[in-house]
Image (cartoon, rainbow, N blue to C red):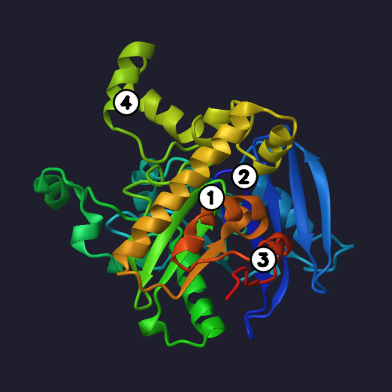
Amino acid sequence: NTGSSSLKFAIYQYENSKKIISGIVEKIKSQKSIIKIVNTDGSTTERFEKGIENHQKAIEKMFKILTNSDLKILKTLSEIKIIGHRVVHGGSSLKNSVILNNSILNKLKQISELAPLHNPNAITAIEAVLKILPHAKQVLCFDTSWHQTIKEHAFLYAIPYSWYKNHNIRKYGFHGLSYSYITKRSSEILNKKIDSLNLIILHLGNGASINAVKNGKSYDTSMGITPLEGLAMGTRSGDIDPSIINLMSTILNKTTKQIEEILNKESGILGISEKSNDMRDIWNKIEEGEYQSKLAVEIMTYRIKKYIGSYIAALDFNVDAIVFTGGIGVTDYGIRALALKGFEKIGIELDLEKNEMAQSKYLESEISTI
């Protein structure tokens, strides 16, 4: 699972889908990267590495870990038969999970600009696996697939209709693999049939989005044709007036592509704080009294509140649960508290003690008073 600055991985037994080990390489492309391993007994180990400069190096590091004689996970890499990849954008042509071949890889490269922070990293990871394990079967699963149920009135932009007919310009949505799983799991936890389940799911990480789920299917989502639309994220601006692109292109004497690059990689939490896109760093700066870091959190959580409110209305005020997931969503109780502040007036009340206790990536928790 290649993120913009991370690589998550897990090994499963093919016969029974039993997870053997999982882990994550974080802060890729930073001066100091972090590698975390979750062992079979649930224990975790963490170590720091000198900056892992790209996702190819992260893949190589992952395979070294998996064949480490001390961990006793794999004797050789030849034991790996199938590798599944989460790929952010499948465009209009890659709608379902597929087995990798040259044609699929070429299609993926053609649409990489639609998810500039993720798809190029996924391609790097895929090609690294091809080099190291050329005989292993690779399966690609797309985040955009889940959102195929969104209807035209929700996925179309109010632009010339010919742009959609001729060029497939529309909202695609992302984090679909996460939303699909969360919907199924919420159905089990709430003991409610999935086809009558209405949810608002918040996937909050360095990339962040919200999904309105109606009758167990994606109904609307905050990200658009690319992951740039929607919430204020780690390095992405989220929603802005499109005129800003040409305006700043003129003022800064930069191309529109360069401005888009800034909106993707130098905006959001990083852009406002001018310090970091990592919420752990941001909270530390807030404790030190740093104004712009506090402002970045206020902008982020205000945007989240607006989307939650709009999706409550879109679901006709019939919502079974609000669900938080993603690295920030499941560990950052401060963001959750600010995002839900005020909703007690319409019956959504946060239990502050439960919320503060819910900081585990591996344990589901209820954080409401009901």
Name, please, the residue furthest toward the right.
70
- Identify the mark nearer the N-term, 3 or 2: 3
Q: CA distance from mark 2 to mark 4?
A: 35 Å
Which three-letter amino acid code belongs to the residue tagged 4? Ile
- The residue indicated by pointer 3 is 10
Q: Position of residue 129 (x, y in %)?
A: 59, 55
- The residue indicated by pointer 4 is 244
Task: Tell whether label 4 touches label 3 (CB within 8 Å).
Answer: no
Query: Helix, strand, or loop for circle 1?
Result: helix
Left or right for 72, reference 182 = right
Question: Mark 3, residues whose alpha carbon is within 10 Å: few (<14), some, or many (≥20)?
Answer: some
Query: Helix, strand, or loop for circle 4?
Result: helix
Q: Position of residue 193 (x, y in %)?
A: 42, 87
Which three-letter amino acid code belongs to the residue tagged 1? Glu
Q: Which numbered disc covers residue 127?
A: 1
> Residue 12: which quarter of the image?
bottom right
Q: Position of residue 159 (x, y in %)?
A: 15, 43
Q: Which numbered disc covers residue 56?
A: 2
Q: Position of residue 248 (x, y in %)?
A: 35, 19
Q: State the count of labels.
A: 4
